[in-house]
Image (cartoon, rainbow, N blue to C red):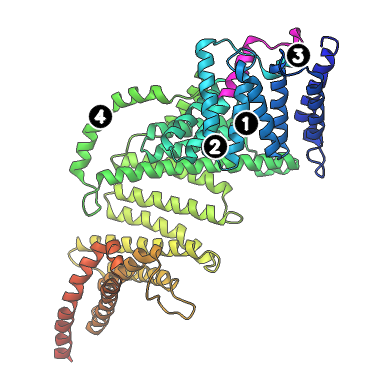
Amino acid sequence: MADNWDLVCDTYQRALTASDVESKSDPENEPYRSKYRARELLREVRALLGPEEDDEAARLGVVEFRLGVNHTETEEMSAGEEHLVKAARLLERCRLSHDCVSVYIQAENNLGILWADRGEIIIAQTYLESAESLYCQYMKKIGKPPLDPDEHFTSEEQRLTEQERAKRFEKVYTHTLYYLAQVYKHLKQDEKAAQYCHTTLQRQLEYDGYNPVEWAINAATLSQYYLGKQCYMEARHCLSAANVILSKAGQIPSPEAAKETDEAEQERLDHLSQKKAEIARCWVKYCLNLLADARKKLEDNIGELDADLQEELKAERKKQEDEKEKGRKKAVLFGSSDVYDSILAVEEKVDCSLPLDFKEAREVFLVGQNYINEAKEYFQLDGHVTDHIEVIQDHSALFKILAFFEEDYERRCKMHKRRVDMLEPLCKELNPQYYLLVCRQLQFELADTYYEMMDLKVAIGNKLDELDSHTIKKINSLVQAAIKFYEMFLDSLRSPDKKFPEKLEEDVVRPALVAKFHIARLYGKLITTDAKKQLENMQTSLSYYTFLVDYCAENEEAIKSVETELELTKEMVALLPARMERLRIQVSSFS
């Protein structure tokens, strides 16, 4: 064996070079040329080694492992599985030894990935959990950094340092945890998936083994899990870390400078810009959720801010805050001290406790708005229609929630006007033939916004001794604008021959019936001194209310989606005819 040992090592190293280096420049029409060459060389190594019964089992296990990986890389999964299983079998007896533990865990990792790709998640879970358990066992019993698989084919002087071995072994285990996180996510074990994802990200930073862009996106994705759990401190920490780590991937140049770069670099920078915009959108969701949860806590039964509750919550928060921050910080820190300082600097720019008044809400709003502008730089209407619209809708939602905290009705009205100004141009520009659902969303939101503004103007008018002509004109024009957009939304539900559906699709039942209810109410808000016109408006109002009552009588399953509106509607259907009768008598006595 000693005679041809140099040849064995040389052949093995050539196989690695072919697989890892030369394959990068393989021609498009032969994408696996170097991988096939590596495979032949590995087979030569196997032939040069002795039979598997003697002390060659570990080396044969490494070769089988490499052959397994090679076959999966060339998309020959069954052959890949065969070699990986053989590697595990050869190493089974010595799997807890210093020489074999790393390659055994890697074989199990690869088998886990292979089965996950086939959609067999439970089998994948078995392999990966076995790899996890073996790592823990080894660290407990032996703890010394083990041999890296490729060291089986190097001379003594080429062996790795303990430090390098430890780094490589930890990287192998990080992969185990990363794939387990995916497995638990597939199995809908969200909490476990988040926990494994968090540990993976932490370890990648610790052992400096990560791609900054990928790491940042994974951290931003994890933040969305914490958002769903209302763990704002953890969500903010993940997003701040995503910002810091993404900045390590390089600066995004100005459009002028970008023109000078070559195609590959251009592609990389475009990818970087996209990911930066995606993380910005995660920040927007953070700000939106924080504001929306605060609103839920503060609103009274008619959706206004409850001042007594506000004072109560402020006092309670003061008491809890210090304890909470101390207790939870320990669990979620990312990174070494220098990285952590940078993360802390980002965190300090936005709060993670619920805003309880306008000043606090505005600070969260402004952070959200900054990230909206960042997202819009990449997601422009030309080329990214759906994403662009979603960003604008989020911007509108930020204004809507901020308005809740604003006590002054005039200023609140101005915030809703900002929403109209950003949504209306989009609504005009989009072709409903291609973007029907988006157009419906925009029409309904615009109608609702005008409806809200009308209610605010009526409330402002009610505080005046007498309505002046300017206020009347304003209220009427808001009423008409709201009706126009609700009607546009309802028209979009009609069949090609303009018939309104007898039975509404499940996803539009509530919006369609609410639109009918609001139109009925809007006709009742039109201000006119002409009694005949008044009668006409009341008649129109009644017909919309009646539609709602009749529809729910014929489709009882719709009742649960509009219970509150239906109750008010029935009252109006009972009251309006008598009111109209009184008005008719008035009109005829004057004529």
Which dot marks residue 384?
Answer: none
| Spatial separation of the CA atoms under disc 1 and disc 2 | 24 Å
Q: Which residue is the site of mark 3? A: 154
| Spatial separation of the CA atoms under disc 4 and disc 1 | 51 Å
- Rendered residue at 44%/75% (across/down): 494
Which dot marks residue 318?
Answer: 4
Q: Which residue is the site of mark 1? A: 110
| Spatial separation of the CA atoms under disc 4 and disc 2 | 34 Å
Determine whether the residue tagged by mark 3 lies in a helix, strand or loop. Answer: loop
Q: Left or right? Give the position of 334 relative to 559.
A: right
Residue type for callout 2: Ile
Determine whether the residue tagged by mark 1 lies in a helix, strand or loop. Answer: helix
Q: Position of residue 504 (x, y in %)?
A: 38, 70
Q: Position of residue 13 (x, y in %)?
A: 79, 21
Sequence-first disc among 3 and 4: 3
Sequence-first disc among 4 and 2: 2
Q: Which residue is the site of mark 2? A: 217
Magenta range is: 154-173
